[in-house]
Amino acid sequence: MSQLTVFAADNPAQPLLHSSDSKLIQRELNSAGVRFEQWQATAAITADSSAEQIQAAYAADIAKLQAEGGYITVDVISLSASHPDKQALRQKFLAEHTHSEDEVRFFVRGQGLFCLHIAGRVYQVLCQQNDLISVPAGTTHWFDMGSEPEFTAIRLFNNADGWVANFTGSDIASRFPLLP
């Protein structure tokens, strides 16, 4: 189940808001300039589904998003707990950073925690299966896949270079709770 926890950026010990209500999550994130919605597949998806099958199951939603946001590249990424570089990958995403383009992710299966540092607050969004999040370009954030990652996500990009981070050098991410 999707969850949103909001903290004051200077107080990671006391949440200001915690909710699993998808409508409330969408309202809160939209008011912070972040797109959040839920999609449903048009075909059955399993852990063994190919990238092509996954993209086909969400083709209409992907096409709509591409038209709205000008996204030129779409791919599917999967990470499992058996991946030999899972700890290094986790550490790479845990440092606060920005992107020069929107970071758009749709969770086909599994989960991931997006932590958004916006206007003196930290919005922790636990995205799960069927959740779409679009973090606007320039938004400071970090991502946690957990110590035993298990997810498949569709990624959309405005450029052919894919994921390019601009790290802030801040240690804020180390002060907030993460996935186990």
Image (cartoon, rainbow, N blue to C red):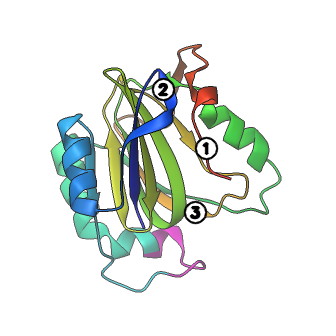
Q: Which mark is residue 151?
A: 3
Q: Position of residue 63 (x, y in %)?
A: 23, 59
- Give the Cα separation between the discs numbered 1 and 2: 15 Å
Residue 48 within the segment the image draws in magenta? yes
Residue 164 in percent (x, y) is at: 51, 28
The residue that mark 2 highlights is 11
Front: mark 1 or 2: 2
Disc 3 residue type (three-letter): Phe
Estimate the spatial distance between the alpha carbons at disc 3 and disc 1, rounded to whole Å. 16 Å
- Residue at image position (42%, 86%) is 44
Q: Nearer the viewer, residue 134 or 162?
A: 134
Magenta stretch, residue numbers: 46-53
Q: Tell me how many marks there are.
A: 3
Mark 1, secondary structure of its residue = loop
Instruction: Give the structural element (helix, strand or loop) at label 2.
Output: strand
Mark linked to residue 146 = none
Q: Can you give x and y, in whole percent of width and height, for residue 75 in the image?
A: 47, 55
Q: N-terminal of the two: label 3 or label 1?
A: 3
Task: Pinpoint residue 83: horizontal percent, then vertical percent.
Answer: 77, 57
- Residue 178 - label: 1
In the depicted view, which residue is nearer to us: 112 or 134?
A: 112
Classify mark 1: residues with Cα within 10 Å, few (<14), some (14-19) or many (20+). Answer: some
Mark 3 residue element: strand
Callout 3: few (<14), some (14-19), or many (20+) C-alpha neighbours within 10 Å?
Answer: many
Indicate the amino acid at tag 2: Asn
Q: Is residue 160 above or below residue 152?
A: above
Q: Identify which residue, 73 or 95, lies in the foreground.
A: 95
Q: Which one is in front in this view, the residue at disc 2 or the one at disc 3?
A: 2
Q: Mark 3 or 1, which is nearer the eye?
A: 1
